[in-house]
Amino acid sequence: MDDQDFGTRDKRGNWRPHQALKVGPLLDYPWSGLRVLRWLPSYLLPWNAAFFVLACLLWFCLTPPREELATLQFGWIAWLFIRNTILVFLVFGALELRLYIQRKQANRFKYNARFPADAPADVFWFNSQIKDNMLRTFLSGLPIWTAYEVLLLWCWANGFGPWALWGDGRLGLAVWLAAFALILPLIHELHFYCIHRLIHLPKLYKWIHSVHHNSINPSPWSSLSMHPIEHLLYWSDTLIHVLVPSHPLLLLYHFQISGTGAVVGHVGFDRIETSDSQAIKTHAYAHYLHHKYFEVNYADGTLPLDKWMGTWHDGTPEGDRAMIERYRKRKASRKPAS
Ligand SMILES: [Zn+2]
Ligand SMILES: [Zn+2]
């Protein structure tokens, strides 16, 4: 495919799409039901639907039965860890292999023209972004993800929390669970926005979040490459499942959105080519801009949080100018009056 049909490349070879990013219409003003209806397919497909299917596979085929989960035992805890590790290895690894190691589509649709492996940097363990990112994912990301999952499944198995069961005949409950499933990605985005703003406070940024931002040019393995405290904060939104009626399937869906799903923002390519004439849109641009410019797009734009707070970057040259103007004004306001 010719990526010049869909975007432009600057002098450095960095690519940007012609189309400006748009925030999701659910809470955007002026509100339009028609806009919401038109947007819904892109909200569900391909990613959220794929993560729900994955969650079903994990819940129905790869999660121990309730009786087993009721007692904390090494065997099933280790199994959940291995299961999650294999899943992440397969999903992140497949994307990394195809796009960054085999470089099947060269840098077509790649926002940053360069590949991280071509620019070793001493901010990374072993001077290697991929080794550093993988180690952080396996050493603290997956253990902390699994610890939350173990805790919450154990709570469910022991009846701690207002857990609901499918098919107990209450229509209201079924409607709630369906609605909860639909808005789970939005709950995750709202929570992520809040903790993300928190860890961008200068002291916390330096101590915690700079680890994630070392990957200015992210690749799939950058997705969960974080400081352990960021991992702890990142998955704390799953505790909502012991606060409102939920079901373990929705809990596992939540982990797919936030765990495996973290890859969506870090693919680094706008489209993944599947044939000479077809490609899948990745939805990676908003978060790529956050990695590039740091102080824009703290959320992904499904909710208009950045637009409300004046930090939205739509990826266009006008977006660049608005960002530079914002920085200029902020710098001027910090200067002591003379
Ligand atoms: Zn990121
Ligand atoms: Zn950040």
Image (cartoon, rainbow, N blue to C red):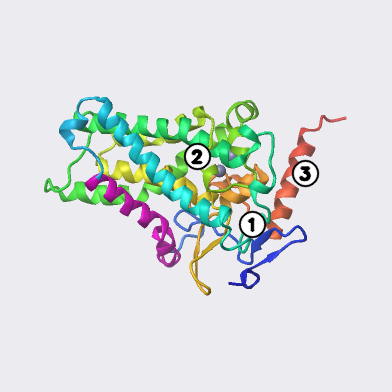
For disc 2, the neighbor class at 10 Å (few under 14, some 14 to 19, many from 20) is many
Quadrant location of the N terminus? bottom right
Identify the element where label 1 is drawn: loop
The answer to whether residue 170 is left or right of residue 206 is: left
Residue 72 magenta: no
- Crowding around mark 3 (Cα neighbors within 10 Å: few <14, some 14 to 19, many 20+) is few
Q: What residue does disc 2 label?
A: 224
Label 1 and label 3: CA atoms lie apart by 25 Å
Kindly identify which residue carries mark 3.
328
Q: Is mark 1 within 8 Å of ligand 1?
A: no
| Residue stretch rendered in magenta on the structure | 33-61
Q: Does residue 310 appear anywhere in the picture?
A: no
- The reply, left or right, for residue 30 in relation to residue 152 is right
The amino acid type found where label 1 is placed reads Tyr
Q: Secondary structure at mark 2?
A: loop
Q: Which mark is residue 111?
A: 1
Q: CA distance from mark 3 to mark 2?
A: 32 Å
Q: Nearer the viewer, residue 251 or 175?
A: 251
145 or 32: nearer the viewer: 145
Q: Amino acid at mark 2?
A: Leu
Is 183 on the left-hand or right-hand side of 191? left
Q: Quadrant of ligand 1?
A: top right
Q: Is residue 37 magenta?
A: yes
Which residue is rendered at x = 29% and y = 32% of the image? 152
Work out whether 221 lies above or below 17. Answer: above
Q: Label 3 amino acid?
A: Arg
